[in-house]
Image (spheres, rainbow, N blue to C red):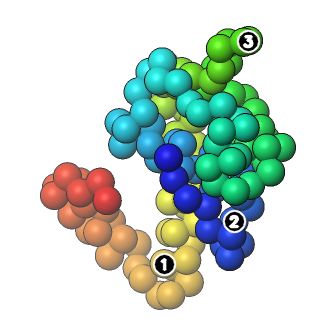
Amino acid sequence: MFSIDLTSRTPIYEQIYNKIVELVISGHLTENSQLPSVRTLAKDTGVNPNTVAKAYQELERQGVIYSVPGRGSFIAKQDNKAFTEPALKDFDDATVSAMKCGISSDTLKRHIDDIFTKGDSK
């Protein structure tokens, strides 16, 4: 499904969480798609099953997935709240970084307008 960067400063469970969210946002994982079992994903990525379980628990807590006892974990119907809050936090962090680099609010606004005009979703 994906690989883990063991040299990253981002905790492994967050990498798993972020990758699954990315796959949902991009449409590669759709509503009711089944995720690999905790053990399968742990084996495939070479990480501890408890780490995968922690990511799945957070995904479920945020409403990204749901679990069916004895059947596994599935992608939930998305209300976008699970995605908008982290995206806005990332946006806030990036904006603060840009301001610290001396980029003006007018430049940032023009850049945002350009992105919306181009429809660029990178």
Contact between labelled residues 3 and 2, with CB atoms less than 8 Å apart: no
Q: Quadrant of residue 12?
A: bottom right
| Residue at the extreme bottom of the image, as rendered | 102
Which residue is denoted by mark 2 in the rendering?
A: 10
- Whether residue 74 is situated above or below residue 11 in the rendered picture: above
At label 3, the amino acid type is Pro
Q: Secondary structure at mark 2?
A: loop
Q: CA distance from mark 3 to mark 1?
A: 46 Å
Which residue is denoted by mark 3 in the rendering?
A: 69
Q: Secondary structure at mark 1?
A: helix
Please report whichever mark, 1 or 2, sits nearer to the chain's N-terminal start. 2
Residue 37 coordinates in the image, percent (x, y):
66, 31
Q: Secondary structure at mark 3?
A: loop
For this view, does 6 lie left or right of residue 88? right
Q: Which callout, 2 or 3, points to the residue nearer the camera?
A: 3
Determine if residue 15 is in view. Answer: yes
Residue at 52%, 69% in the rendered image:
94
Residue at 36%, 71% in the rendered image:
108
Q: Nearer the viewer, residue 24 or 84?
A: 24
Residue 63 coordinates in the image, percent (x, y):
62, 26
Query: Tag 1: Cα neighbours inside 10 Å, few (<14), some, or many (≥20)?
Result: some
Please report whichever mark, 3 or 1, sits nearer to the chain's N-terminal start. 3
Q: Quadrant of residue 38?
A: top right
At label 1, the amino acid type is Ala
Residue 75 coordinates in the image, percent (x, y):
53, 25
Residue at 56%, 72% in the rendered image:
96
Q: CA distance from mark 1 to mark 2?
A: 22 Å
Which residue is denoted by mark 1 in the rendering?
A: 98
- Whether residue 56 is situated above or below residue 90 in the rendered picture: above
